[in-house]
Image (cartoon, rainbow, N blue to C red):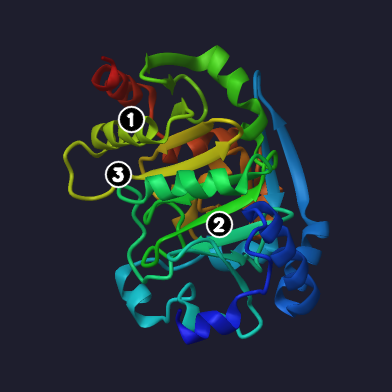
Amino acid sequence: MDGDLSKRLLIVDEKLSLDIKANLLFNHQVENWQLAKNGYSSLKSVKIKIFEFDDFTIEAHYNPGRIISSSAKVDDKSIKERPCFLCVNNLPSDQKAVSIDDDYILLVNPYPIFDKHFTIPTLRHIPQTIYSNFKRMLIISEMLGKTFSVFYNGPKCGASAPDHLHFQAGNFGFMKIDTEFYSILNKYGEIINDANDVTTTAVTNHLRNFISIESNETEQLVNEFIRVYKVLSENSNEEPLLNIICTYNEFWKVIIFPRTIHRPTYFYEEGEKKILISPAAVDLGGVLIFPREEDFNKINEDLVIDIFSQVTTDNETMNFYVKKLKY
């Protein structure tokens, strides 16, 4: 084991389940790491707006602690010029970790969205990519269990560290889609595959079109994900723009949001027209994060609709994917 890592690991009973270890790590960090303590204390002052649609809810949160992530420069030049903040050697001195396996660690995120917010980086400094790492995401989701949602932001879809493979996790139920999933499927979903212990559904004519996969069989689920991935990538060598939310409660529910662009036009405007919003998995899960109060004050239902319409896949494209994915 790397010397720096062994000093950083929180001493816990290895026989404990990962969800219990996560809670122990969280309690330790908010008690002993001032940055984390401040971050989670700041959640008490988060302001919330609620937008009720026919069959689902979108929340807008004013969370100034997320300014670093929302405004992160993720161009190649900026990435090369800064040290990787997910590499073990570059972590803050007070940050502790829990080992997940020989390749991943669990960290408390000191700039939280969730009441308990974790970052799950690999120990290797390798690019953010899901194709060959999706199975590990499933395994980690199962290990954390039903009280956590695990999510993945693509390198051009909200990942503030596109140079270092990582997942994130937060309390199940915080993202509105955690609990609204089946009501959305019932109204907007079309089953496109229901065989080999896998059910794949396409959601269209919705504010956030997506593809979901449900299964309790790991290998079949991985194979189905790869099939979806290849359709979304259209034979491109680059990862398709996407965000993924994964939950496990006796079986996996995987929600894949195909994307069109990284950030809406509002992000690049100047002056009064600017809205600092960089949608990622949590936003697509139904909680839009605004780190600036002036942007939070502007947000209304029309802007919510326009932001999602810019960054998510339209009905025509989704129908194309459906035709490709149907057996």
Which three-letter amino acid code belongs to the residue tagged 3?
Answer: Pro
Task: Classify residue 117 by image quadrant.
Answer: bottom right
| Mark 2 vs 3, N-terminal side | 3
Judge left or right: residue 264 versus residue 76.
Answer: right
- Residue where numbered disc 2 is placed: 276
| Residue beneath the point at 77% across and 78% down | 32
Q: Residue 19: x, y in percent?
A: 66, 52
Distance from label 2 to label 3 (Cα)?
A: 24 Å
Q: Residue at x 67, y 30 (%)?
A: 179
Horizontal side, residue 176 vs residue 319: left or right: right
Give neighbour class at mark 1: few <14, some 14-19, many 20+ (Cα, 10 Å).
many
Sequence-wise, the earlier of marks 1 and 3 is 1
- Of circles 2 and 3, the one toward us is 3
- Decide which of tag 1 and tag 2 comes sooner along the chain: 1
- In the rendered image, residue 268, in percent from the top left (x then y), is placed at 44, 57
- Dot 3 falls on a residue whose secondary structure is loop
Q: How many marks?
A: 3
Q: Looking at numbered disc 1 in the image, what kind of residue is underneath it?
A: Glu
Q: To which residue does mark 1 refer?
A: 224
> Looking at the rendering, which quadrant does residue 1 occupy?
bottom left
Confirm whether residue 307 shows in the render. Answer: no
Q: Answer with left or right where residue 11 lies relative to residue 313.
A: right
Do residues under tags 2 and 3 come within 8 Å of each other at their CB atoms? no
Mark seen at residue 240: 3
Above or below: residue 277 compared with residue 317: below
Point out residue 127 in the picture as x, y percentages from the top left corner: 33, 63
Residue 272 x/y as whole percent: 58, 56
Identify which residue is drawn at 59% across, 52% down. Answer: 169
Is there any visible trace of residue 139 in the rendered image? yes
In-image side of 53 versus 285 (left or right): right
Give the crowd class for mark 2: few <14, some 14-19, many >=20 residues within 10 Å: many
